[in-house]
Image (cartoon, helix red, strand yellow):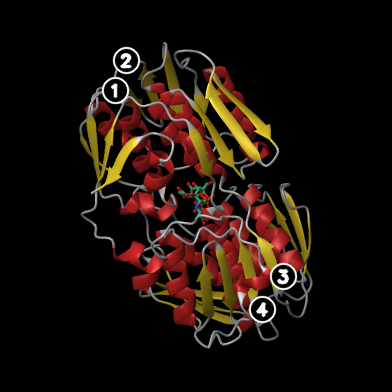
Amino acid sequence: MSPFPDFKNLKSNRDSYPSSDPETLVQSSKLDKIVVTGGKPLNGIIPISGAKNAALKHMCAALLSDEPIYFENAPNMLRDIQSQCDLLTYLGCQIRREKDLMAIDAGPVKSQTAPYDIVRKMRGSILVLGPLLARFGQAKVSLPGGCAIGTRPVDLHLNALEEMGAEIKLENGYINAKAPQGGLLGAKILFPKVSVGATENLLMAATLANGTTVLANAAKEPEIVDLGECLIKMGSKITGLGTETITIEGVKSLKGATHSILPDRIEAGTYIIAAGMTGGTLKLENARIEHLSAAMGLLSQAGIEVEQSGFDIIVHREIDRIQGIDIMTEPYPGFPTDLQAQFMAMLCLCQGAGMVTETIFENRFMHVPELCRMGADIIVQGNSAIVRGVESLKGAEVMATDLRASVALVLAGLVAEGETTINRIYHLERGYEDIVGKLSACGAAIKKV
Ligand code: EPZ
């Protein structure tokens, strides 16, 4: 018997949802590949899923309450969401998913240990640290370790929690954290560097702390604003969301809530770039242009026309060839690092040249050698890459290395001459729900083998 009343009072905004259930997605083997035959323009409608980089944190926020939290517009078919479900279930949560609906009941949570073999699969698990510490006064979370794009330290998370009175010891690859008797203490925290994850961990921890917490030099991403709005529905007292100073007044406990997760701006940005590369017109359902502010200006400079029409985004390429322009990744509202690889794929066929500068991660150019194998002309110097437009790309067998590099290779395959095979597509399935289904519905010659 599910611990939840059925989902009848929740509204699924996806009449058609990918057929296979999340569990079968996870079973798909590491040998799966995607084969794309280039040259087809994209025309049609793509439903944009709920934001992965919001949902993963909202799920952790459920740990703060002993009442069920209900989510609409959840991207249930993502590998990372499955990993987060595995972790929360391990801790004792009851979880139910149906299409894009999700319910999490953290009432029965009895463990506060996030083990290595789950955390290593998905770094977003570090976001259980703040909620567990805040609600249970203790947490033992495996250090997430690095990933392909960088060492990904968590020092900003840990130093800030210590400022709230937590005692933190690192032993055998685990973070052992204890809150003072009576719980975490409100504190004035100045982050030495803008960090999305650290802002989110501390935002959640502060909701149940004694007194008021101020987070200065906080990240301003829309996913953080959405997390804050969910926490406010649960009874938190938060002001300053979306600015660099967030103030949280601790409360004794949080209650259940229902929240619709904001659309995935990176998925939307990826398909906007896809339309810019292939030509054609796409309608992206349930997507919000205001969340892609800086990127929009640069995309229209490159020649891509994007407009908001109600809840949807309409995108088409204005001119017959993308213009080369320079981009630099920055914390929100700057150009998002999660669109850097995709933008670089677009620059490969541009008129002229463009310079791509990556300021957020130390190793986020792994897509470069693979794009060069398809005939791109890219030279990397330090944290910048010079992309000179070529007449065409040639299909090739390529290797995906991280989530966004993988999708950049799919985009390149959509415009390359001949066939491109992308290996290790489990990276892709971490962050793009049903990408083969969504692209083939718009005319792309793409299939999973
Ligand atoms: C989030 O990662 C996203 N992941 C990333 O998306 C995104 O690229 C990143 O924010 C920046 O927007 C999720 O939301 C799950 P950070 P996060 O803390 O929170 C350094 C994708 O493709 N840093 O803002 O880990 C860090 O090394 C992924 O969907 C410290 O030095 O990013 C990086 O250089 C990739 N110490 C910079 O700050 C810390 O304690 C920004 O990292 C934490 C971070």
Mark 4 or mark 2: whose residue is earlier in sequence: 4
| Category of crowding for the residue at label 2, using alpha-carbon neighbours closer than 10 angstroms: few (below 14), some (14–19), many (at least 20) | some
Q: Position of residue 24 (x, y in %)?
A: 34, 66
Q: Would you say the beta carbon of the disc 4 residue lies within 8 angstroms of ligand 1?
A: no
Residue at the disc numbered 2: 390
Three-letter residue code for mark 1: Ala
| Category of crowding for the residue at label 1, using alpha-carbon neighbours closer than 10 angstroms: few (below 14), some (14–19), many (at least 20) | many
Q: Viewer-proximal residue, 108 or 332? A: 108
Q: Is residue 221 above or below residue 297?
A: below
The residue depicted at 47 percent of the width and 66 percent of the height is: 125
- Which element is circle 1 on? loop
| Category of crowding for the residue at label 4, using alpha-carbon neighbours closer than 10 angstroms: few (below 14), some (14–19), many (at least 20) | many
Residue at the disc numbered 4: 65
- Which element is circle 2 on? loop
Residue at the disc numbered 3: 207
Answer with left or right where residue 91 lies relative to residue 372: right
Q: CA distance from mark 3 to mark 2?
A: 52 Å
Q: CA distance from mark 2 to mark 1?
A: 7 Å
Answer with left or right where residue 220 lies relative to residue 269: right
